Image (spheres, rainbow, N blue to C red):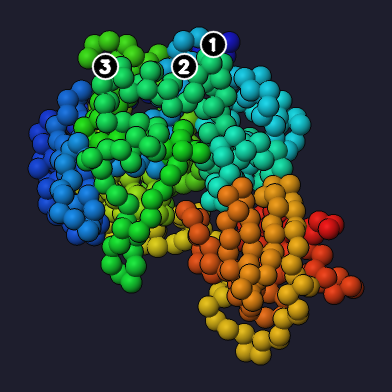
Amino acid sequence: MKFAALALLLTTLCAAAQERRPHITAEQVDKAVAALDALAAKQTSVPGLAIAVVFRDKVVYAKGFGVRDINGKAPVNADTVFQLASVSKPIGATVVAALIGDGKITWDSRLNELDPTFVMFDPWVTHEVTIRDMYAHRSGLPDHAGDLLEDLGFTRAEILRRLRYQHPDSSFRSHYAYTNFGLTAAAIAAVKRYGMEWEIASEEKLYKPLGMTSTSSRHSDFVARANKALGHVLVDGKWVQKFQRDPDTEAPAGGVSSSVNDLAKWMRLELANGKFEGKTIIDEKALTEARRPQILTGYNPFTSMPTFYGLGWNVSYDEQGRLRLNHSGAFDLGAATYVDLLPGEQLGIVVLTNAYPIGFAEGLGTTFIDLALYGRSTQDWFALYKKVFSDPAVLGLTPGFDYTKAPASPAAGLKPETYTGTYHNDYFGDVTVSEQHGALAMIIGPQNKTFPLQHYDRDTFSYQTQGENAVGLSGVTFLIGPDCKATQLTVENLNIRGEGTFKRLPR
């Protein structure tokens, strides 16, 4: 009872403090909105972008800049559809909240009870892990578990099945580690209780009720749009439209495509605690639970305030006690997005770009929030985020050894038959090394992706990686047995956490 009384007192004090806290005025927001055109003029940093701002349940700004494709002249507007990457996560959390409101599941429903086929490496974790754990990235799975399987062409179902072979990186619920496929596993388990597919559930529970007619969780719908922004990457300092990113395997975590006009409707719903146009669409309790801190992620370097992950949201509090919700999205193959909400101020901004992540979307969004709150930018956010995103580790990339530099005295390799054969591990499956056109090649994955091997030094070869998590040249090293036959091989870029060693299968 003493603790209950203390909790009640703290709640009362917090409520009183919020009442005393000055709120953002319409004049402050108007001034910040008036600065957006000038901020967006910096868009020469990216081929195209779109911005929407919501304040007090109204769309006060929605506009596009630049071009959809660097090879053409079609302009971006507020209806241009972008791939959202990980901004899909808070949107997916809204869908799960809608399902929870229907009463068959909760945030604490166990995945293995919703989907008995789902298994983790540890049997006890398999029994205990919940939707909440996966949406908070605290399951023990290592950072970005499953992403390399996606690059190799495995289906969603097969990636989720293979997570049972993924050794944990930490003890259950002890650490935060960002995982697209852990969150995807939770979303897929949630819709199974309703006998639905994720893509259909997203439409029925969120997109259709809000009239988000340009929004989808299917890549094919994005491809079919006439007004869409294509992804760009930097090549020799210039933006190039080179790749298509199909994120269907991780649709709940990264597969949504939408326009800022549509996303403004979603922001209005979020800021109105589940209501839209006066009608309750999402259960308020389930929705607001996603905004509560679930696990510590670090400390703000400028304020020393703790930062958290909620359920599909980054959650923090500023020095005035305001709840801050945000999320970035990034495809290395050409997308960078950002959403930032201040629920207590009824203010939100979303920024979408069709460019490899360089921190521009975050810089613009954070600068706008500063202008609305303080009338000035507290930091040079564009420069700071640009510096942050210049670190490959921020994007989940581990470059590894530099195979572009030849060894000083390379040793010759052995005969091709020393290396050829089929090798296996449970997580990645089979790798076949064969001789093709007088050189070795590595064949891997369900689509039999073929990678030519270039000799580097004795029993080490290099190859060019591909996909969202490509790191340029990586290495393949063979271990030679007493019979002059390779007994195993290790693929360096697949071996970040020890999963990349393959044992030779008997002929």
Image coordinates for residue 477, horizontal then vertical, percent = 70, 69
Give me the disc on residue 104.
1
Question: Which residue is under mark 2?
Answer: 99
Image coordinates for residue 242, horizontal then vertical, percent = 35, 59
What element does badge 3 sit on?
Answer: strand
Q: Is residue 337 above or below residue 56?
A: below
The amino acid on which the numbered mark 3 sits, given as a three-letter code, is Phe
Separation of disc 1 and disc 3 at Cα? 23 Å
Do the residues under discs 1 and 3 have CB atoms within 8 angstroms?
no
* Residue drawn at 32 percent across, 11 percent down: 280
Image coordinates for residue 293, horizontal then vertical, percent = 48, 31
Judged from this view, the residue extending furthest toward the right is 482
For disc 2, the neighbor class at 10 Å (few under 14, some 14 to 19, many from 20) is many
The front one of 203 and 294 is 203
The amino acid on which the numbered mark 2 sits, given as a three-letter code, is Leu
Looking at marks 1 and 3 on the same chain, the residue that comes earlier in the sequence is marked by 1
Residue 320 can be seen, yes or no: no
The front one of 199 and 292 is 199
Judged from this view, the residue extending furthest toward the bottom is 409
Looking at marks 2 and 3 on the same chain, the residue that comes earlier in the sequence is marked by 2
* Residue drawn at 71 percent across, 25 percent down: 127
Q: Quadrant of residue 44?
A: bottom left
Relative to residue 98, is residue 2 drawn left or right?
A: right
Question: Which residue is under mark 3?
Answer: 276
Separation of disc 2 and disc 3 at Cα? 17 Å
The quarter of the rendered structure image containing the N terminus is: top right
Relative to residue 231, is residue 66 drawn left or right?
A: left
The quarter of the rendered structure image containing the C terminus is: bottom right
Separation of disc 1 and disc 2 at Cα? 8 Å
